[in-house]
Image (cartoon, rainbow, N blue to C red):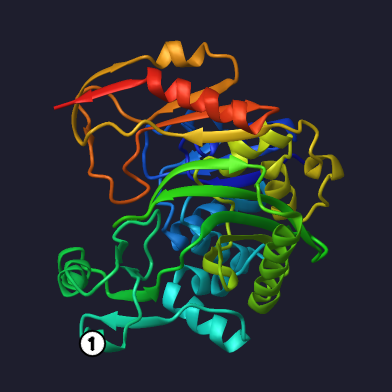
Amino acid sequence: MKEYIWIIGGSIHQLPAIYEAKKLGLGIVCSDYNSDCIAKDEVDIFINISIYDKQAHIENIKRLKDEGINLKGIVCIAVDAAITMGAVNDYFGFCGISEEIASICKDKTLFREKMDVWGLPNAYFKILTKESRSVDIIKIDFPIIIKPNNGFGSVGAKIFYNEVGIFNHINYLLDDLDFEKILIEEFYIGEEQTVEAIVDKDGVFTPEFITDRFFTRDIYPVEIGLQNPSSLAESIQSELFDFAKKIAQNLNIKNGTIKLDSIITKKGARIIEATVRVAGGLDPYFLVPTASGKNIMQNAILTALGKPLKKEALINSINKYALTGSPLPKPGEIVDISGIDEAKKISGVEKVFLFGNIGDRIKEYKDGTSRICFVLVSNKSLSRAKEILEEAISLIKIETK
């Protein structure tokens, strides 16, 4: 009987997983709240529900099973719905992380508390709520970052180098944005990475990739580019994978992905946050395969099905450097877009992603969701790859008013 995999989310970010599932001969079920999502016509069964609705996923899977659909697992790719995946795994006994594990990672304050319990290097942090929002400024060592407890993509996060504006931002998050809980946290200084590994069906921890991440850090932490493979020394990369393994063990991950946002500081490797889903930000499904040929999507799908990983999916068969970057037009309404086709013609430009059209608005650059254009390039030489990226970005003109 044909096996099916459920993929949470139906955007461009899930398409590589859908295509990989097809290569594996699987039937595909996909859920998304957008009834016109890009993946709708690419899958066997589309379910129009919120990716965050755990019960709706469970009820629909029960229905499909009753109808004879041999659904064997669920994956969460580049969407912040690991709790949904965990709830489904718990209910049906699928191979993968639990809802409890996903909830620990989703709750940034709980994760920080767990890091202390586990005895792992941790940031100074303080939890604020609507009912308890007082802060003793004198006791704070700057810089700090103030962010929502359960946000993503740096939404709502702001860096402070002194006390000016702190209370305004606290009130903005708790009152205007209506978050129940926020976090004041030590702001680490250093270079950031994504670290991803997978615990296979037999419980074996398997490193997958490390990507260097580049940010603006003046006030808001806005990611502006990626590089794979990392330029970090092999010893530091080993330290980061060891850190990921310790966190996976402490979380008691039996099977599934562990993804860290890490940073190398003067005191050593530190963890900004963790999640238990495949990374977003173009990393595992465009950047890493372009640089190395590694098949991160296949790893996630096979593990969710309780099947062994294929060794060739973890081998660097390409040995290139891949980079992403973005033009950063002025915020405002888009009135003209040009240079996309010219940029695509440059040798070494792999893809140009555009997530906006004339008439759309570009937000102020306060978080990772503000960028509307991403350029992916590759080359055997890192310096040449950087030149290609710079040339491509210079050609793309997005005018606003």
- Identify the residue shown where x is 46% and y is 56%: 80
Residue 234 against residue 380 in the figure, above or below: below
- The reply, left or right, for residue 84 in relation to residue 303 is left
- Identify the residue shown where x is 79% and y is 45%: 314
Q: Amino acid at mark 1?
A: Ser
- The reply, left or right, for residue 345 in relation to residue 239 is left
- Identify the residue shown where x is 42% and y is 57%: 52
- The reply, left or right, for residue 352 in relation to residue 252 is left
Front residue of this view, candidates 135 and 197 = 135
Front residue of this view, candidates 27 and 337 = 337
- Identify the residue shown where x is 51% and y is 74%: 104
Residue farthest toward the right in the current orientation of the protein:
311
Say few, some or many: other residues with alpha carbon within 10 Å of mark 1 (under 14 / 14 to 19 / 20 or more).
few
Front residue of this view, candidates 118 and 95 = 118
Give how far across and how far down residue 354 sits, in percent. 39, 27
Circle 1 — which element?
Answer: loop
Residue 97 against residue 218 in the figure, above or below: below
Is residue 198 among the parts visible in the rendering?
A: yes
- The reply, left or right, for residue 329 in relation to residue 72 is left
Give how far across and how far down residue 247 sits, in percent. 65, 73
Give how far across and how far down residue 368 sits, in percent. 37, 48
Choose top left, top right, bottom left or bottom right for residue 271: bottom right
Give how far across and how far down residue 275 sits, in percent. 54, 63
Which residue is disc 1 drawn over?
Answer: 132
Front residue of this view, candidates 65 and 347 = 347
Q: Quadrant of the C terminus?
A: top left
